[in-house]
Amino acid sequence: MMKVKWLLAIALFFLTLTLVIQGGKMGKVDLLVQSTQAQTVTKTDFQNESTPFMASTLYRNPTTLFQPVAPSGAKGVNIKWENGQSQIWYIEEQKYGEELIIAGIINNNPTIIETGFKMFDWGFARQASDGSFPGTSDDFHSTSFFVQAVARSMLFIQQSPVSSKYSAQVAKYKPLVLRAARWMITPDIWTIGIKRNLPYTHRRYLVAAALGLTGKLTGDQELITYARTSLNDGISLQLSDGVNPEKGGYDSSYQMVGLVYAQRWVSYFPSDSITPKVITMINKGLNWEKGRILATGEISDVGNTRTGPGLDVNRTGNFKPVDNRFVVRGFAYWASATGNNTWQSIASRIASFYYT
């Protein structure tokens, strides 16, 4: 009897090995996913974003980061709109206040932090009583960017050494960002916004981060419920090879935009029932993305559906390039969160191409 069990165990081992080998790339992906998923994600958002690597790459020149910003706090196309040189403005342009606040905290630079607050103030000065931003173009999507930025910045401050210093600012922005997030889930607004988001998988994770983090900040459980719905939708769209589709294909830039927003959910909701599925999705997505990183560290845009020459244009009318900042962050952040050095080595290779 023992001999039979022993033979069955050997047969099962070789059958599993054969399936993995025959599975080729997907077999390797599944094994790496299982290995990484087994690790507990326990570090905070502040810890993952403020590593020495992050500080020396993404935040090393805080005074020149996302400049220019107008004295009023306006950013990007909003400066032209403010000066009467454009008919359109986007609330999302003010999202870069998040990066400045974080850069200021990491580099102990209060001036940069205040500039970030000023950018948020410019946006909220144009908020209506129902939480919307009348006049902004692409209202639902643009608002989701801004809501995520504000909510995440406030949570980041609360985890940082300067939490008490900026507690008044956190208290100030809480009701404002809550009002904007609640506007997003107004039934008619939600229905139209989600319909417009259909071709873009990354927007599911952006919306989830915007609503989930605002819910975390303010204690609004309904927002968190909506966030879970958006996460489930995004997870269901992932292809077997790890691609999160954009406009019917893959995109090496937007793949990482979505993964970064999903990572923020994991950091703030590590024990949520949906989080293990989010972690699996992230690992599969990163395994696909690493195949887009050339030996030099350059990010390939070959075959992209949205970023690269002749594809989508940004708010200023120029073709969208691959956002290397999101790609570096996605690998480095997850390396810190999981302790997986494979991701850090990829992040370092990319940084050596774009940041040296």
Image (cartoon, rainbow, N blue to C red):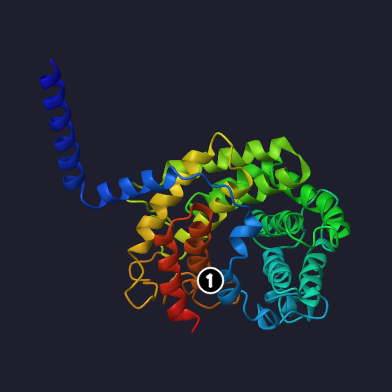
Q: Residue at x 75, y 59 (%)?
A: 157
Up-down relation of residue 111 to residue 198 (above or below):
below
Quadrant for the N terminus, please: top left
Label 1 Cα crowd, 10 Å radius (few <14 / some 14-19 / many 20+): some
285 above or below 86?
Answer: above
- Return the x and y of residue 80 as percentages of the image width and height: 72, 80
In the image, 188 versus 277, the foreground residue is 277
Q: Is residue 172 left or right of residue 102?
A: right
Which one is in front, 104 or 237?
Answer: 104
Could you tell me which secondary element the residue under label 1 belongs to? helix
Where in the figure is residue 67, as x and y percent of width and height? 68, 81
Residue 349 screen position, x and y as percent? 41, 73
Work out whether residue 257 or residue 180 is closer to the camera in this orientation and state it: 257
Instruction: Name the residue tied to disc 1.
Output: 325
The image position of residue 123, as x and y in percent, is 78, 64
Q: Residue at x 63, y 39 (%)?
A: 226
